[in-house]
Image (cartoon, rainbow, N blue to C red):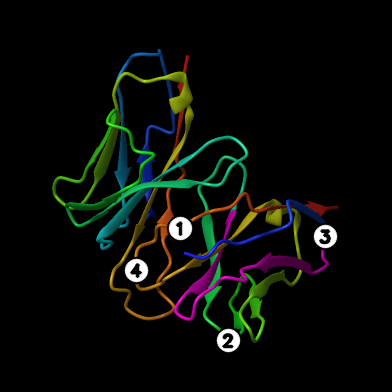
Amino acid sequence: DTGVSQDPRHKITKRGQNVTFRCDPISEHNRLYWYRQTLGQGPEFLTYFQNEAQLEKSRLLSDRFSAERPKGSFSTLEIQRTEQGDSAMYLCASSLWPAPGPRNTEAFFGQGTRLTVV
Amino acid sequence: DAKTTQPPSMDCAEGRAANLPCNHSTISGNEYVYWYRQIHSQGPQYIIHGLKNNETNEMASLIITEDRKSSTLILPHATLRDTAVYYCIVSQTAGTYKYIFGTGTRLKVLA
């Protein structure tokens, strides 16, 4: 297993365009998380899935953002009508829940997709 | 989840131990302390976590005070590749991984 994979790694788009990012979690992980990170700040939670169910969404996730995990495996994050303020690194993480033991509870992060809106 | 406070930056000489402190005075009894680090332009990498006992793995040691209000991450022999931003997070391990990241400590290992 190569870990959490995100595609693309970089995306430049014009303001007003729609963009979609993909995340492939570690294969046996049933939980998947999306975070956003702006320059100089720590990652901020956006939303998470358990299998295909989206269980929580942050207030940061405006109605222009939508995330899906249709078959409980990979996930997509779409941003409609992008704005310059959407420029950030979008991180995906996955974990197994319940964890098999107290030492296997961590979440694993992907390398992120860096979005630049011009 | 409880909030954490970390110094914004620290330097450490290569080969020496790096001791990174974290304050989490509002931690509750069922909350764990997690440490992650983020090397430039990469995703956060898990380092270690603990509840109340000290923990050690191949990467680091975690020392948690008896009152659990603070902790220290120890990198025993820092190398240049340990230069990164280190995040201390308090989270319920049995719940979501809706981590609340602060701004972390930027550790610079000097040759």
Q: Is residue B98 above or below residue A19?
A: below
Q: Is residue A85 above or below residue B63?
A: above
Q: Earlier in the sequence, mark 3 or mark 1?
A: 3
Could you confirm whether marks 3 and 4 are on the same chain?
A: yes
Q: Tell me the element at label 4.
A: loop
Q: Residue at 72% x, 65% y: name it.
A: B20
Q: Which residue is mark 2?
A: B53
Q: Tell me the element at label 1.
A: loop
Q: Are marks 4 and 1 in contact (CB under 8 Å)?
A: no
Mark 4: which amino acid? Gly
Q: Which residues are magenta?
A: B12-37
Q: Which residue is mark 4?
A: B95
Image side of residue B61 versus residue A18, left or right: right
Which residue appears farthest toward the front when viewing the image?
Answer: B26
Q: Residue at 76% x, 63% y: name it.
A: B78
* Residue B24 drawn in magenta: yes
Q: Residue at 75% x, 59% y: name it.
A: B79
Q: Nearer the viewer, residue A79 or A24?
A: A79
